[in-house]
Amino acid sequence: MDSLTDKPLPVEFDPPLLDADYTGIALLMTDLQVALTYLDCKEGRRDTASFQAILRHARRTYDELLGVLPHLSISDDNRRHLDLQLPVLQMRLMRFGEEFPSSIAESVMVPPHA
């Protein structure tokens, strides 16, 4: 549960080593879910300014997750969840014309914990 909103987090985390770590991971997980949800909601209106802002936010979320994922100290279950959701976000971004270097695309498309 999120102590600020009393709503369940997308994934329950193991007890964190540091509150800052927990908060950062929870924020990343929430940002990932928001990006996926907004892309779903706005898919039919690609030409609007709000959709372009959502697309930029989703790409920034993807890039941030890709950068920090190797450095996160999280449980195997949480790692698997991120490993499965990151390719989903990447595929949705690609559907909207985002391009990725082939080395990144190949490494992300096959989750290592499959």
Image: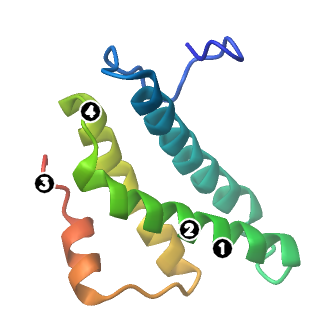
Task: Please tell me which of labels 4 and 2 falls first in the chain.
Answer: 2
Pointer 2: residues within 10 angstroms few (<14), some, or many (20+)? Answer: some
- Residue 112 image label: 3
If you read the primary sequence from the N terminus, does the residue marked by circle 4 or circle 1 appear first? 1
Q: CA distance from mark 1 to mark 2?
A: 6 Å
Q: Amino acid at mark 2?
A: Arg
The quarter of the displayed image where residue 12 is located: top left
Question: Where in the figure is residue 13, as x and y percent of width and height?
Answer: 37, 21
Q: Disc 3 or 4, which lies upstream in sequence?
A: 4
Q: Nearer the viewer, mark 3 or mark 1?
A: 1
Q: Amino acid at mark 3?
A: Pro
Q: Quadrant of the N terminus?
A: top right
- Above or below: residue 46 compared with residue 65: below
Mark 4 is surrounded, within 10 Å at the Cα level, by few (under 14), some (14 to 19) or many (20 or more) other residues, namely some
Element under label 3?
Answer: loop
Image quarter of residue 15: top left
Q: Amino acid at mark 1?
A: Arg
Is residue 44 visible to us here? no
Q: Are marks 1 and 2 in contact (CB under 8 Å)?
A: yes
- Residue that mark 4 sits on: 74
Which residue is at a point 65% across and 62% down the rendered structure image? 39
Q: Position of residue 111 (x, y in %)?
A: 20, 56
- Secondary structure, mark 4, is loop
Name which quarter of the figure residue 66 lies in.
bottom left
Q: Are marks 4 and 2 in contact (CB under 8 Å)?
A: no
- Above or below 18: residue 69: below
Residue under pointer 1: 56
For the residue marked with disc 4, what is the amino acid?
Ile
Label 4 – label 2 distance at C-alpha: 21 Å
The residue at 75%/77% (across/down) is 52
Q: Which mark is residue 60?
A: 2
